[in-house]
Structures are given as structure tokens and as C-alpha cells.
Image (tube, rainbow, N blue to C red):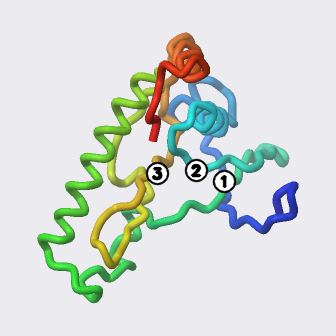
Amino acid sequence: FRSTAGNEIQVVAKKVNEKKGEVGNSEDPFYEYMVMEAVQSVGLPTIKPVLRATVGSISIFCTEKPQGVGWYDRRELKLQEHGYSEADINNLVDQANHIMSDLKERFDAAGIYRGWKLKDMIFDIDLEEKKLKRVTPTDWERTKIDWQKLAAFRRGLDKGQVKDII
């Protein structure tokens, strides 16, 4: 795809499961897309939503392809072939858990509540330094938002009362 500025972007498409989680509860096939927009609007990490469409009875949305690898694809990194020991790999898991704990606090402060599982994250790993550069949450269909708390959080951002989001 190309952005409105003409820049090429890689995207990932997702067919919406209209019965899953808050998507089913809300009866809004684009609930997950809306959550990503809300998360992005307050500067918290998410994959950038790009477009959404319904064709017949099928709803899909596209996001920019994130930097990194999903937990489910970690074996493809072949970390041991890059000189990683079992301790190095365990250290990456510890880093991920620490970052996710920090993200949970930040999201909770904004009124955005979700599960925090390794399988629902994309990890951008600095292979040479053996550390995580970034953890990006994915899979927002079960996320709940306290809209009043989110609005108050956004006002705090606007007034400079909330700092160091990421």
C-alpha cells in the first residue's frame, strides 16, 4: 500500500471474528480497530490501524506491519545460532515481562484494560546486544476501555500532567 503522502507501507490484514470478546459484546465489527485508534491517540504503543472495510458479511481491517517478531515466531529467529545461551533467552523473557508490567500500569492509568500475555505481543529484539528494543501489544478484541478515565488521561496529556508515556 501507499500512504496519502505516497510512502510505501507494509500492512497486515485481519479478518474480524465478530463473536469474539468485546467485538461480539459491542456488536461493532471494528471495535478492535477503534481500540487501536484510542490507544494511539494517547501515545501508548500499538500497531497503527490503516484501513477497515466490510465486503458482504465479512469485515477486515489492515494495520501497518510492526517491527519485530511475534512470540509464536520466536523460533524463526534461531537465537541459539546467533550465540544466545539458555540464560540469554531467559533474560529476554524477563525483559519482556518487565516491559509488559510497565505497559500494564500505563494502560491501566489510561483506563485501557487488557490481558498481558507474551503471545499477544510483537518483540523488536536487538540481536547483537541481546535485549529488547520494544514490545508492541496486539490482539485488542478483548480490551475494555473506561471512556471517562481515558478522557481524563487525555486531558492530563494535553495539560502536560502526564509525562513519559513510552
- Callout 3 environment at 10 Å: few (<14), some (14 to 19), or many (20+)? many
Residue occupying image coordinates x 35% and y 34%: 104
Residue reaching furthest to the front: 160
- Callout 1 environment at 10 Å: few (<14), some (14 to 19), or many (20+)? many
From this view, report whether residue 68 is shown above or below residue 39: below
Q: Is residue 8 left or right of residue 42?
A: right
Q: CA distance from mark 1 to mark 2?
A: 6 Å
Residue occupying image coordinates x 37% and y 38%: 103
Q: CA distance from mark 3 to mark 1?
A: 13 Å
Amino acid type of the residue that numbered disc 1 sits on in the rendered structure: Thr
Q: Is residue 119 left or right of residue 55?
A: left
Amino acid type of the residue that numbered disc 3 sits on in the rendered structure: Thr
Residue 63 is marked as 1
User: Which numbered disc, 3 or 1, marks the residue closer to the eye?
Assistant: 3
Residue occupying image coordinates x 28% and y 39%: 101
Asked whether the beta carbons under mark 2 and mark 3 sit within 8 Å of each other, the answer is yes
Q: Whole-percent x and y of residue 112?
A: 47, 26
Amino acid type of the residue that numbered disc 2 sits on in the rendered structure: Ile
Between 98 and 146, the one nearer to me in the picture: 98
Q: Is residue 62 left or right of residue 71?
A: right
Q: CA distance from mark 2 to mark 3?
A: 7 Å
Q: Whole-percent x and y of residue 127?
A: 35, 76
Which badge, 3 or 1, is on the more N-terminal residue?
1
Residue 136 is marked as 3
Q: Which residue is mark 2?
A: 47
Q: Whole-percent x and y of residue 20?
A: 53, 37
